[in-house]
Amino acid sequence: MANSWKEWEKPVLELEDGVNKLKALAEVELDPEKKAALETRIEEFEARIENFIKVRYSRLGPWEEVLLARAEPRPYTLDYINSIFTEFVELDGDRRFGTDHAIVAGPAQLDGRPVMVVGHQKGRNIQERAYRNFAMAKPEGYRKAIRMFEMAERFRMPVITFVDTPAADPGVESESRGISEAIAASMLKMFELTVPVVSVVIGEGGSGGAIGIAIANRIYMQEHAVYSVIPPEGCAAILWRDPAKKAQAAAALNLTSANAKSLGLVDEVLAEPFGGAHRNPAEASETIRNVLLSSVNELSHLTPEQLREDRYAKFRAFGVMTQVRV
Amino acid sequence: MLARKSASQTPHSHFVQCVNCKKTLFLADFESNLRVCTYCSHHHRMTWRQRVEATFDEGTWVEMDTELQSLDPLGFPEYAEKHAAAVKKTGQQDSVVSGTAKLFDMPVSIAVADFHFMGGSMGSVAGEKIARALERGVEMQAPAIVFCASGGARMQEGLLSLMQMAKTTAAVDKCRQNGVPYIAVFTDPTMAGVLASYASIADVILAEPKSLVGFAGARVSKQAGVSKVPDDFQTAEFVFRSGMLDRIVERRDMRGILGQLCRMLGGHLKLGALNG
């Protein structure tokens, strides 16, 4: 069982390193025959890389999907905000207690149309991760989100959320300031909205922390994102008293994008660039941008009351059970 | 820990032992005192039936939504067996029972969670019953009361269980839109996905003394390296101090307080079903 996405990417990185070296050699090679031979080698290597990625990424198991969803090179919320929107102005503070860098928010332009953007934000290095609290939002984060939702409602702006969190912050501070109430109130506020709401799960859809900002008319999930009621480690610890059984737990939880789609809980899985969004962030952004544009346009044809009712009806129907009259 | 035992009772015995102070109590006294220890006032857990009998007008309870039955949509390891065992143990279909009753002659819509059924966990059926109980309050033009007792979302139904947090919240929104009072009562324990959805956004929140109430289980908090935990961390008292609930109410007073609240907050409703 892998412990990091780097394990299966290692051969790729080595091959890519080899290709770069060969390219450097080919560049300074003056003998046309040797140069041609080098270029043949480069092509071979590139074909091998492509083939390796194709094969490897076509058979990622659920646990590997979890690792990939958590991978540091994956584009994060701010990466997508910067590539998809123009004029993003970050706003902050819950006007109650403090600020929370695990959630970023503010107005932006989507193809010339003002929208309100809210998303979890991860960090790539130790300092950033500490600053972002590993994208684990405290009550302040959800209350900041609520402020943004209210503003969007007042100013008739569509709301776009990006979901990427391992979980909400579980600390004593969060408990004492009502993390549960903050999550529930954020969901409630999203149900009340009469503007279009679109959510995209771009990495980890981690339980309550995720659903707290994911009450939308349209829910999209990137191919290699995961969405789960509990992290596999926690599930394994509770069910089998053994966190090492996380791979089994990941399989049992049905947390991949394909699972979520087949359960009817997301509208569409967004195909990622060859070998994952981190290999081609521009292409991944373009895919998201396109669905945001089309869904916001479609939803704009609904009346305010229809938008609210549509969201209610969507979530009210979620659940699998029998209804046998006894 | 969630696995706090209910008062231990030896077979064929007329006695029980309080799980808190360990003193021995007459079973008859214990039951007539609503399963509260006469020595230390520890509130022992109740089954949903005991709860209904202790709270609402005698003979007015009508159970509904009994047609709803859980499936095993993910084919989750051991779920079918665990669920079947819970049905056998408790005689109920799932962790939540819903229906209607009267409280001092006022019609009310009710859902009661029972911790004895798979830790009161919320899957599709529990979520549906909570949502229906809340929306039935709107249909009946009567207050909705939910007794919470749950370790959280039921992981054996995966993402479907997470979505029950959203679904029940959607139903709370319906109550709010229609001016129907919704009162939540936190009993031991009220945790995680249940606390972070319909439970925390009730118009009024009451709690039984010393109930375990929190977002993250003790194990999760420990893993997250949570330090300097107050002695009463994740108790109803701690949550009350934090401003997250309205009142801590002793079990013997619960019926009366609920009655007062329903009468005053629901005073504007046209209680068409008042005589029915």
Image (spheres, coloured by chain):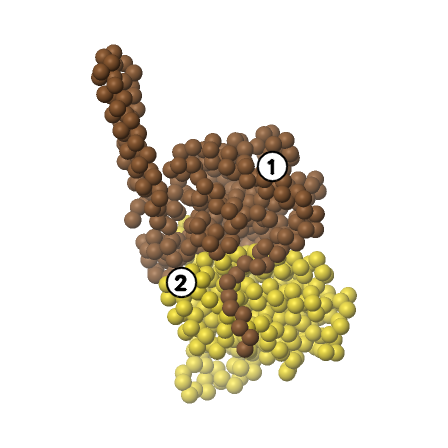
Chain letter for the brown part:
A
Chain of the residue under the numbered disc 2 shown in the image: B
- Residues at discs 2 and 1 both on one chain: no
Q: Could one spot residue B246 in this view of the protein?
A: no
Label 2 vs label 1, nearer the camera: 2
Q: Nearer the viewer, residue A209 or B132?
A: B132
- Name the residue at 59% across, 79% down: B53
Quadrant of the image occupied by residue A152: top right
Front-most of residues A271 and A252: A271
Q: Chain of mark 1?
A: A
Do residues under tags 2 and 1 come within 8 Å of each other at their CB atoms? no
Residue type at the position of mark 1 = Gly
Is residue A54 visible in this depiction of the protein? Answer: yes
Q: Mark 2 = which residue?
A: B75
Q: Quadrant of the C terminus of chain B?
A: bottom right
x and y percentages locating residue B171 in the rendered image: 62, 60
**A216 or B270: which is nearer to us?**
A216
Q: Residues within 10 Å of mark 2 (few under 14, many from 20)?
A: some
Q: In the image, is residue B142 above or below residue B162?
A: below
Image position of B138 (left or right of B214): right
Tell me the residue that label 1 is attached to.
Answer: A106
* Quadrant placement of the N terminus of chain B: bottom left
Q: Which lettered chain is shown in yellow?
A: B
Residue at 47% x, 31% y is A282
- Please report the residue visible at 69 percent of the width from the left and 65 percent of the height from the top: B138
